Image: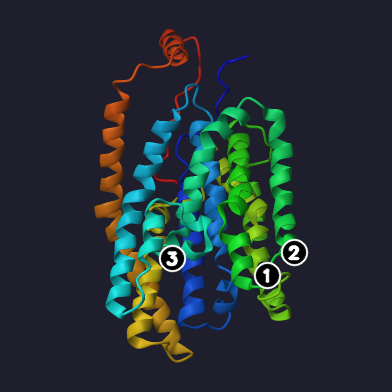
């Protein structure tokens, strides 16, 4: 009792970084389809691309568990909070200012009160402020809630392997239960949508499922497979099939009805995303990451995905204010390419000159403060054991570019 748990696999998971780009692409295409205009084939497939946010919530839990779940002396709650603050808040602040500036330039009502709530990352807890200063930032409010939960959740779960499978099953079951609860909620689709899709409590099972899956993969608690890549293709196919099934479902049931696919597309696919993350992480751990996800270009696009997610809707809003919706067909396709490509290029600039430098600066300051604090006694013991060769455990390096 009290001994550090064994670790498996590398500290870096490049395939998960590559998957971030595809999830962000889903969200971008969702906004283009809904706001700019739909396209044949691609439009219906992207109509429920907001499921990419569900992927990000599962991914967040997975990577945090992978990073901190193998450490014999996990970071304290304050250190953890500083690291998360350095990761998301500087770019959130900048894109909120850009969004407010865009609203002022196009003559829209400035959501100043909601923006102030969003800067504190509490805006999704109330319907009037859920979109904050930058509508895309609502998910960061949910992430802030997850960051508060994670340290005690990890302390509770890390030593209790027998609880992982029942908890994963519970989180999986809560998706359909919450979706079915839409029948009991107010008929107003705005209120129902906030309760089921935006409220952080509703999204918490997705994050917890990611945490449990990350712990299970990190510590080799999942069933063995013939080869690491043998599970990746079926998991990816299941995710693709889910999005294909949403097309006829949408044609048969309007989104305004509770049993339509709108909320289902957010609440039901979390287990599929968890399986995909587990399969991709296994490939990385086995040293055979797929080039489509872990190649140099794929990883670079994944690194840009956070900035892309936060900035793309601002560009869409400004374009529509100046030019309006384009004509169907080739004109719509051209605007899709222009807005998606332009916002991706802007995201690359923001990543290079804002996101990464600010994170390094804030994390460096935090490390400087942490270095003056005494180490816990248990951490000192572990360090001595490692110097003496008494343990084979390897320290875990935080994959900060993943979350």
Taking the image as drawn, is residue 397 in sight? no
- Give how far apart the Cα atoms at labels 2 and 3 are: 27 Å
Identify whether 85 is placed above or below 126.
above
Q: Secondary structure at mark 3?
A: helix
| Towards the viewer: 345 or 172 | 172
The N terminus: image quadrant? top right
Q: Residue 184: which numbered mark, if any?
A: 2
Q: Residue 305: which numbered mark, if any?
A: none
Q: Secondary structure at mark 2?
A: helix
Identify whether 32 is placed above or below 52.
below
Which residue is labeled 3 in the image? 135
Q: Residue at x 61, y 49 (%)?
A: 206
Q: Is residue 329 left or right of residue 202?
A: left
- Give how far apart the Cα atoms at labels 2 and 1 are: 17 Å
**Residue located farthest toward the bottom when viewing the structure as drawn:** 327
Q: Closer to the N terminus: mark 1 or mark 3?
A: 3
Frontmost of labels 2 and 3 is: 2
Q: Quadrant of residue 132?
A: bottom left
| Towards the viewer: 113 or 136 | 113
**Residue 129: where, in percent of width, then height?**
46, 62
Which residue is labeled 1 in the image? 261
Frontmost of labels 2 and 1 is: 2
Q: Closer to the N terminus: mark 2 or mark 1?
A: 2
- Give how far apart the Cα atoms at labels 1 and 3 are: 22 Å
Q: Residue at x 37, y 37 (%)?
A: 82
**Residue 200: where, in percent of width, then height?**
56, 52
């Amino acid at each position: 009792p009290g001994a550090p748990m064994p670790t498996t696999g590398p500290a870096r998971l490049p395939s998960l970084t590559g998957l971030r780009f595809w999830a962000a692409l889903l969200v971008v295409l969702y906004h283009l389809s809904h706001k700019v205009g739909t396209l044949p084939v691609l439009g219906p497939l992207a109509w429920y691309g907001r499921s990419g946010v569900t992927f990000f919530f599962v991914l967040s839990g997975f990577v945090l568990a992978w990073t901190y779940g193998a450490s014999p002396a996990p970071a304290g709650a304050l250190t953890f909070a500083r690291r998360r603050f350095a990761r998301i808040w500087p770019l959130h602040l900048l894109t909120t200012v850009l969004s407010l500036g865009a609203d002022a330039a196009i003559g829209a009502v400035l959501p100043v009160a909601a923006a102030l709530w969003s800067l504190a990352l509490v805006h999704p807890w109330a319907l009037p402020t859920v979109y904050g200063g930058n509508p895309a930032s609502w998910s960061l409010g949910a992430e802030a809630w997850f960051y508060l939960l994670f340290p005690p959740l990890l302390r509770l779960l890390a030593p209790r392997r027998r609880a992982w499978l029942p908890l994963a099953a519970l989180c999986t079951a809560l998706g359909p239960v919450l979706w079915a609860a839409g029948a009991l909620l107010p008929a107003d689709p705005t209120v129902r949508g906030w309760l089921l899709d935006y409220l952080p409590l509703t999204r918490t099972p997705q994050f917890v499922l990611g945490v449990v899956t990350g712990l299970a993969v990190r510590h080799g608690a999942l069933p063995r497979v013939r080869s690491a890549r043998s599970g990746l293709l079926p998991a990816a196919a299941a995710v693709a099939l889910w999005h294909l099934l949403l097309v006829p479902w949408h044609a048969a049931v309007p989104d305004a009805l509770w049993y339509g696919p709108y909320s289902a597309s957010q609440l039901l696919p979390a287990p599929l995303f968890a399986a995909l993350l587990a399969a991709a992480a296994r490939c990385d751990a086995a040293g055979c990451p797929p080039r489509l996800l872990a190649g140099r270009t794929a990883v670079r696009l994944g690194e840009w995905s956070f900035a892309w997610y936060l900035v793309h809707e601002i560009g869409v809003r400004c374009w529509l204010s100046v030019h309006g919706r384009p004509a169907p067909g080739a004109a719509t396709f051209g605007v899709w390419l222009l807005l998606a490509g332009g916002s991706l290029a802007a995201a690359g600039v923001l990543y290079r000159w804002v996101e990464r430098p600010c994170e390094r600066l804030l994390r460096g300051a935090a490390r400087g403060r942490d270095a003056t604090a005494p180490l816990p006694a248990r951490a000192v013991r572990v360090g001595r054991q490692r110097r003496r060769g008494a343990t084979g455990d390897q320290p875990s390096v935080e994959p900060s570019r993943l979350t």
